[in-house]
Image (tube, rainbow, N blue to C red):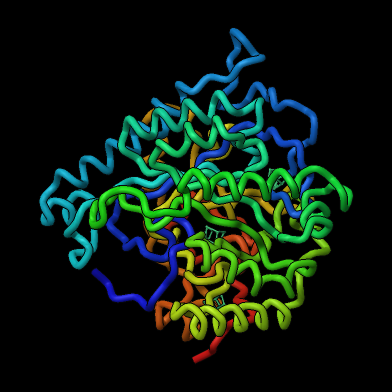
Amino acid sequence: MSREPPRQIVQAGLGTTPDRGVIQSLWIEQPANCDLQCPYCFCATRRGVRDLDPENLAYDQANPERYRVDLYVTNILKPFAEKIAAWNEATPEERVALFDCPPENAEGHIRGKVAIPGAGEPFHPDSLWLTRALIRETAKLDLHLTIFTTGHWIDDSLAEELAAEDIVLLVKCNSRKKAVQNRFVGQRANGYFFDKREEALQRLMRFGFNRPFGEPGSDRYQETRLGIVTSVMRANLRELPDLLRFARRNNIIFDCDTILERGRGSKCPEIPSDEETSAAFHELQRIDREEFGKRWDISRSYIGTTCDRFRHHLYVDKRGFIYPCVGCLGDEGSGVPPVILGNVKDGPQALYQAWETPLMKNIIRLHRYEGPCKTCLNYEEHKCYSCLGRCRNLEVRLDPQDGQTPVSMKGCWNNRAK
Ligand code: SF4
Ligand code: SF4
Ligand code: SF4
């Protein structure tokens, strides 16, 4: 397997998944139900309005007040799990021949990873039935599941139910100061969110989510199943070291990225300057090294790791459209065109067809980029693989059928030119 610099666990498999020629991770959206109104929300949910969009994968024509899970199962989860099973059952030679797996990565065993992103709150009462169904179905197919959540809908009974499952919960935690946190979700300083979220974090620790899970050495083993999630923002810049320490001292994942400029995030006044962002990354890197003995390099998007999703991942939105990753969603407000590779409603074959489009197969998966990211030393040293959402030249439309033209990249504040 290729040798890469040290990285920390942020999201399952992120920064640690080699190219094996096959899809290994998927993000799947649900309908966008949420009672909060975060200024940086990339899916721009509408507070208090139930998402009954008839285009949704979960839309049930016979009973629009409910959701259905069957399309998620037949057209996403099963084809995904079957492809991974086929790879696992193949010999190393077959993996190279049938999957274009690089020979150096042809050994080993893959466990498919699914995440439900916080594009709408999965445990919101309007989405809970569907989330439970997805937990059940991923478990049946032996897929690992991560759920991004605000946490504040999780009570004792739900925590107990979730504790028995092989899932990781990544809980929104932009600040541990009440007024700051509540403003981050669009509430007044004394709003209800902060207290409920704090209770939820304590509750999840009480139910053992921050303890190791599964047999050490097995592919079900997790050092912890609890994380806190935030972005680097103006209002929490100075607090980030405390959030990192809170996470490290409690065996909690620290999932901290930079704002993705989509949806409400595209006009978000919380985006710090490049200098402020760079200073925050360096300070957190120093604290992790000196206080916790944890080493990692500075990339563009995440604290503690680098995004390697270009080589193992697809993203499916709530209407079934398939993208290379979340950074390839469109944004009408800013005139950014989406990069749509297909739609899972076309059948169980659509997911893999998307993976095999010329753009994915010959450009993105091979990391054929041009511009400052191509000549950056961080790329050469495997410290950063750029970002299709944050560092791409968004004015250049990507054509899924074009397997010739490299992706045009803008680079970033962390560029180290050769
Ligand atoms: S909690 Fe998530 S889905 Fe809800 S508004 Fe905030 S970012 Fe959007
Ligand atoms: S390339 Fe960027 S936007 Fe895409 S998954 Fe990675 S960090 Fe996110
Ligand atoms: S210029 Fe590109 S490759 Fe270099 S650090 Fe920035 S995003 Fe990463």
Give the position of the N terminus as an image quadrant: bottom left
Give the image quadrant in which the ligand numbered 1 is located: top right
Q: Which percent across, then down, holds residue 274?
A: 71, 78
Relative height, residue 234 to residue 182 (above, below): below
Q: Residue at x 52, y 67 (%)?
A: 249
Can the viewer see residue 319? yes
Q: Residue furthest front?
A: 206
| Left/right of residue 94 with respect to residue 34 in the rendered view | left
Q: Quadrant of residue 245?
A: bottom right
* Viewer-proximal residue among 293 and 108: 293
Q: Which percent across, then down, holds residue 166?
A: 38, 41
Q: Residue furthest top?
A: 62
| Left/right of residue 314 with respect to residue 254 in the rendered view | left
* Viewer-proximal residue among 266 and 176: 176
Q: Residue at x 59, y 78 (%)?
A: 284
Q: Quadrant of residue 317?
A: top right
Q: Quadrant of residue 293?
A: bottom left
Q: Residue at x 41, y 82 (%)?
A: 380
Q: Which percent across, then down, holds residue 312?
A: 38, 55
Can the viewer see residue 322? no
